[in-house]
Image (cartoon, rainbow, N blue to C red):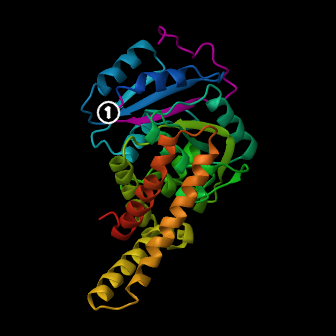
Amino acid sequence: MSSKKPTSSTADLSLPKVSVVMPVINEERHLPAAVAQILDQDYPGALEVVIAVGPSTDRTAQVAATLAERDTRVRVVNNPTGATPAGLNAAISVSSGEVVVRVDGHAMIPRDYVGTAVRILHQTGADNVGGIMAAEGTTNFECAVARAMTSRFGVGGAAFHVGGQAGPALTVYLGCFQRAALDRVGGFDERMVRAQDWELNLRIRASGGVVWFTPELQVTYRPRGSLRALARQYHDYGRWRREVANRHPSTLSLRYLAAPIAVVVMTLGLLTTGIAWLLGSRWAWLGLLPAAAYLVGDLLASVVAAGKAPRARVLQAAWLPLVFPAMHIPWGLGFLRGPR
C-alpha cells in the first residue's frame, strides 16, 4: 500500500462522506488486499475505512494496525465477542459518513463500487442498495460451489445470487446504507449471529424504507473450501433463518421451507422403508421414492450447472452432485433445529 495520503483537503465536499465498515476475524491473508481495493476507489468524495477486529488466532490485529498507520483514512476498533453484528455496530458507532458501506474482510470490490452505490442511493431514494454476490472459486471444489450458488436449484431465486432486474428486494448482499436508515432502525441486532443482514433489511422495509437490488454492483465472493466447511456454513444459515421466521412468521415462503420439508419427507421415507422391510412388505421400496426424486433432481441440476461455464472441467463438475446436498440437507436440519 502507498504512503499516507489524507483526502480531507482534496475530496469533493458536495458528495456524501462514505464510511466503509469491515468486521474481520482471522483475515490476515486477505485483509491488506481488501483494504487496498477500498482505498483505491474512484469515488471523489471523502472516504474512511473502519475495521472491527475480533479475537483472531492469526496476525489480523497487527495487520489492521499497520494498515491504519500507513493511511489516515483507516481506523481500527476492537470487537471482543468476534460476532459479525457486534463488529458492524462497533465500526458504525465510530464512523462519520452519511453513507455506510459494508465490506467483508475477504471481499474484493471493483474500483467503481462506492461511486456506483452512492449514485444509486441518490437516484432511487433507497435506504440500502446492494448487488450480486459473485462467487468465484480458485480450486475445483470452490468452482463447483460457485456454480451451485448461481443455480436456482442450489439457492432458490434470490437476485443477489442469480442476478435479475434492478428494483426493490427483500435483501441484498452486504449493503450500502443511508446512515439515517441505520439510526432509524437501531442498527444490526447483535443477537443474530447469522442472517443479521436479512433481519436488518426486514426492519428497514417495515419502517417504510426501500431495499434496492442492482446488478451494477458486484462483489467477488470466495466460497468455502471443503464439504465440511460448506455444510457447517449452510447449517448455520438454516438455524438463523429459523430465528428470523420465529420473530417474523410472515416472512416464511416455500423457498425457505423447501429444504426442511425435503429433509423431513426423505427421513420419513427412509424410516418407512426400513420398517416395511423388517416386516417383509413387498412395498418397502416406495419409501425410497422421495430420496430418489431428490437424487434425480440433484443430478439434473448438476448437469445444468456444469454446462453454464464454457469448457467446464470434469473435476469441477464431479463435485456438484455432492455440493448441492451439502447445502440443502444441513440448511434443512439447521432450520428444523433452530438457533438454540
In the image, taking residue 225 as reference, residue 170 lies left or right, namely right
Q: Position of residue 325 (x, y in %)?
A: 43, 59
Local packing at callout 1 (Cα closer than 10 Å; few below 14, some 14-19, many 20+) is: some
The residue located at (41%, 75%) in the rendering is: 266
Q: In this view, does 118 lie above or below 226?
A: above
Q: In which quarter of the image is the C terminus?
A: bottom left
Q: Is residue 190 visible?
A: no
Q: Is residue 198 above or below residue 88?
A: below
- Indicate whether residue 219 is drawn in magenta: no
Q: Position of residue 56 (x, y in %)?
A: 27, 33
Given residues 235 and 84, the one toward you in this image is 235
Task: Give the dominant element type of the magenta stretch: helix, strand or loop.
Answer: loop
- Which range of residues does the magenta coloring cover? 1-27
Given residues 92 and 237, the one toward you in this image is 237
Given residues 236 and 248, the one toward you in this image is 236
Q: Is residue 116 above or below residue 205?
A: above
Q: Where is residue 216 in the image (x, y as percent from the top left)?
A: 69, 38
